[in-house]
């Protein structure tokens, strides 16, 4: 049986004590990036996201969170490094609407995307569909009743983004015929108003979902 992929869901708005603990685990570069945010909320969420990422990956790899080292591929996708070589534990993260998703798996690329839109108004969806989706996808969406179109578009968007991030090629781009062969692409049931998807290298991959505690554990 193929090794499963784990997905961790967490809230980014956390108590100050937990945030301070995550700050201590960040690298000098991560702290510098956090300092560039003008809004305190954005800065705190960045610290929470990257601190939780280190905590989750540290547990999975049996390393101290502060000791983890990262590098990036040519498209900017981060990966773990150990002794100067890529670590077999692969991961990806996404955040939106105050939520954080972290996906990780051993020996397989993964990608995840989460969106928590404030509204699902159908107005303006035509422009989004034209810009973001392939013609065959646009046709399928326009065949739906207007009340269903926005939800379907968000579901399709997070699937495409998760796959593009798993493949490590940057932002998703429309193609004449989307290709999922050799990949598992799955919706993640995270509650009303939340659209999320996972993509994992290989077919029929089992997915485990867990929640990270608000206290940092």
Image (cartoon, rainbow, N blue to C red):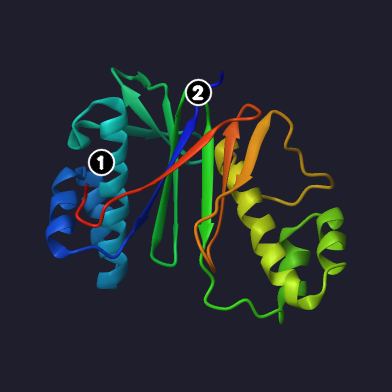
Judged left or right of residue 212, residue 154 is right
Residue 151, x across and y down, in percent: 67, 67
Would residue 195 appear left or right of 133 to someone viewing this image? Answer: left
x 32%, y 44%: residue? 53
Location of mark 2 (residue): 3
Q: Quadrant of the N terminus?
A: top right
Label 2, secondary structure: give it: loop
Q: Which residue is mark 1?
A: 55
Task: Sort mark 1 into few (<14), some (14-19) or many (20+) by Cα contacts within 10 Å.
Answer: many
Residue 168 in view, yes or no? no
198 shown above or below 14:
above
Q: Position of residue 92 (x, y in %)?
A: 45, 41
Image spot of residue 217 (x, y percent): 22, 47
Closer to the chain start, of discs 2 and 1, is 2
Compared with residue 87, is residue 193 higher up or lower down, i.e. above or below? below
For the residue pair 44 and 184, the one nearer the viewer reads as 184
Q: Is residue 160 above or below residue 84?
A: below
Please say whether residue 176 is visible from this viewpoint: yes
Q: Residue at x 12, y 59 (%)?
A: 17
Select label 2 or label 1 by which is in front. Answer: 2
Local SS, label 1: helix
Q: Where is residue 62, by image quadrant?
A: top left
Q: Measure the alpha-carbon separation of dots 2 and 1.
A: 21 Å
Q: Give the image location of residue 176, x and y in percent.
A: 84, 47
Q: Which residue is at the front of the view, 186 or 54?
A: 186
- Residue in view at x 66 percent, y 32 percent: 183
Q: Residue at x 38, y 22 (%)?
A: 87
């Amino acid at each position: 049986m193929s090794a499963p992929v784990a997905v961790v869901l967490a809230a980014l708005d956390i108590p100050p004590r937990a945030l301070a603990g995550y700050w201590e685990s960040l690298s000098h570069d991560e702290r510098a990036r956090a300092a560039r945010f003008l809004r305190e909320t954005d800065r705190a969420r960045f610290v929470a996201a990257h601190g939780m990422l280190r905590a989750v990956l540290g547990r999975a790899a049996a390393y101290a969170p502060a000791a983890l080292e990262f590098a990036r591929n040519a498209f900017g996708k981060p990966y773990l490094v150990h002794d100067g070589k890529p670590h077999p534990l692969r991961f990806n993260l996404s955040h939106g609407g105050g939520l954080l998703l972290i996906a990780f798996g051993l020996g397989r690329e993964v990608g995840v995307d989460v969106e928590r839109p404030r509204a699902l108004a159908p107005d303006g969806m035509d422009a989004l569909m034209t810009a973001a989706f392939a013609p065959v996808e646009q046709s399928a969406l326009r065949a739906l009743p207007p009340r269903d179109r926005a939800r379907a578009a968000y579901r399709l968007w997070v699937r495409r983004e998760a796959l593009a991030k798993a493949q490590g090629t940057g932002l998703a781009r429309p193609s004449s015929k989307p290709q999922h062969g050799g990949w598992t692409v799955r919706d993640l049931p995270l509650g009303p108003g939340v659209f999320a998807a996972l993509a994992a290298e290989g077919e029929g991959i089992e997915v485990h979902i867990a929640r990270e505690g608000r206290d940092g554990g």
